[in-house]
Each structure stands twice: as structure tokens, then as C-alpha cells.
Image (cartoon, rainbow, N blue to C red):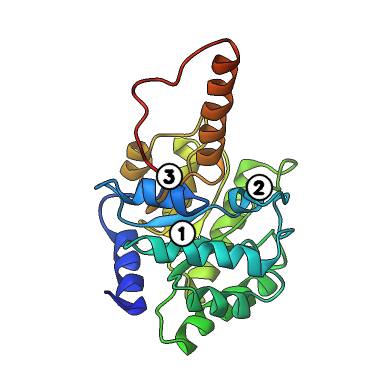
Amino acid sequence: MTTPRDRAETLAALHTAPEILRVVNVWDVVSAKAIAALPETKALATAGHSIAATFGYPDGENIPVELMLDMVGRIVDAVDVPVTADLDAGFGNPGETTRLAIAKGVVGANVEDRVKPLAEAVAAVEAVIAAGEAEGVPFVLNARTDVFLKGADRSVDDKVADAVERGRAFLAAGATSVFVPGKLDAETTRRLVEGIGERKVSVIGVPGNLTAAEYEALGVARISYGPQTQRVALTALQDLAIDLYRDGEIPATVRELN
């Protein structure tokens, strides 16, 4: 059995490896076990949006933090790979929420800035890192900036400059990587990597974005998929139900994953 420190160090090393870290987001124990069973899986990431939806809550810290962390803890206990959790914006207390997550066995997290004033966002990063140090875990923070999600009225140049400024500040405060979700083409990604650092930028895979291999060639450290994985699973379930209502059958190719 590896220690939390071992798992944190493994997760950190995956972010600096030449190969992009591909983390497939999960939302409960059965989804976690299905993905962890694959030999390609080196780490797991929880999707806060998906966990909230599982319990009937809208995204955005509407789910009680205790309920979210209970599910995260169950996921950690069910797998042998490092788990990084989506902690939204820290549920009002990033340091304490990180401490509670570490108690569940989590060794890394996303914490979003919601484009708050830079000093406030940096203070949240510092609180997360301090919580890890206090618990003896070199916590792997994928510090998220929402510049590209909340800047519809801003130019790409402006958003890139803001993301770079925030990203550098987050890294200086102890973050391992900087998560910049949004629609990122090759040129925008190149500029972000150039400004924030090679193997320091984390992106999201959504329809229309580049492939993981293309982001890897641009120097990106990590790609995750947020709520998209649950949406794919739910789409398959709903499509199956439509077929069954039309007198279809369960496909013979279905694997017994539960």
C-alpha cells in the first residue's frame, strides 16, 4: 500500500513527463473502477459537475461539501492509482476543504479562480498548498483560471495575457500546473505554453478542441474531460433506452463491468 506522499509524488511526476497526462474523469465508484481497470490509466480525476449531478444538484458548489467529499473518498478507496479531485472554488474555504480532501486520500485537486481579483485567487492557491504541507502531503494543485470561460467580451490577446499573468502567479504560489479550460486552438495553446511554461498548462477535451496528441506536441502537461465523460455515458444509456422501447435488445458486446 503506497502512502499519500508516494501517490502525490507519482501524480506530480506524471505532470512533468514528456507524455501528456490523460485523466478520464469519473463520478462514482463503479465509473472509477471501470476506468482504473484499464492498463493505460495512471491517475484518476473526479468531475465535480458530474458528482453533483449524480446527487441531483446543479454545478457550482450547490452540493454539500461533505456529500461531495464522501463520494470522492469512496472513489479513492476503490482504486490503486492517485486521485485528484475537483474542489470547485474551495467551497468558501480552500484550505480547509483541501485538508478534508487529503483526509479522504486525495493527493491533488483542481481549484478554480472564477476570475476573482488576482490577490484573492493567489491567496486561495497558497491556502491549498499550506494545507498539504500541514498534512505532510506535497499536494498537486492544478490551479484553474476561468479567463476563457468568463471572458466572452474580451479579445483573445487580452484573455491570453490575463491567463499567463494568473498562471505564473499560481505557479509561484506553489501550484503544480495551471488549468485553462475553454476552446483552445493550436495558436492560443502555443501562446499559453510559451507564457506559463512547458508542461505547466492543463487543458480540457471538449468537442472541437485539439486531440491529446496535438496538445502534447504543443507542450501541454495534462488533459481532462470534465463532465463530458458522464454525458457520453448518459447519452449511451438514453440511446439504449430508446432502442429498447422500440423492441430492441441489449447488445451482445456489452461487458460485465459491474
| Residue drawn at the location 48% of the way across and 64% of the way down | 74
Q: Quadrant of the N terminus?
A: bottom left
Q: Which quadrant holds residue 156?
A: top right
Mark 2 vs 3, N-terminal side: 2
The reply to whether residue 250 is in sight is yes
Disc count in the image?
3
Residue 217 tag number: none
State if disc 1 and disc 3 touch (CB < 8 Å). Answer: no
Gap in Å between the C-alphas at discs 3 and 1? Answer: 10 Å
Q: Residues within 10 Å of mark 2 (few under 14, many from 20)?
A: some
Left or right, 67 with respect to 248, comes to right
Gap in Å between the C-alphas at discs 1 and 2? Answer: 33 Å
Q: Secondary structure at mark 3?
A: helix
State if disc 3 and disc 2 touch (CB < 8 Å). Answer: no
Residue 207 percent coordinates (x, y): 52, 30
Mark 3 vs 1, N-terminal side: 3
Given the image, on which type of amino acid does mark 2 rest?
Ala
| Location of residue 118 with respect to 28 vertically, above or below | below
The residue indicated by pointer 3 is 190
Q: Secondary structure at mark 2?
A: helix
The residue indicated by pointer 2 is 53
State if disc 2 and disc 1 touch (CB < 8 Å). Answer: no
Gap in Å between the C-alphas at discs 2 and 3? Answer: 34 Å
Given the image, on which type of amino acid does mark 3 rest?
Arg
Residue 196 tag number: 1
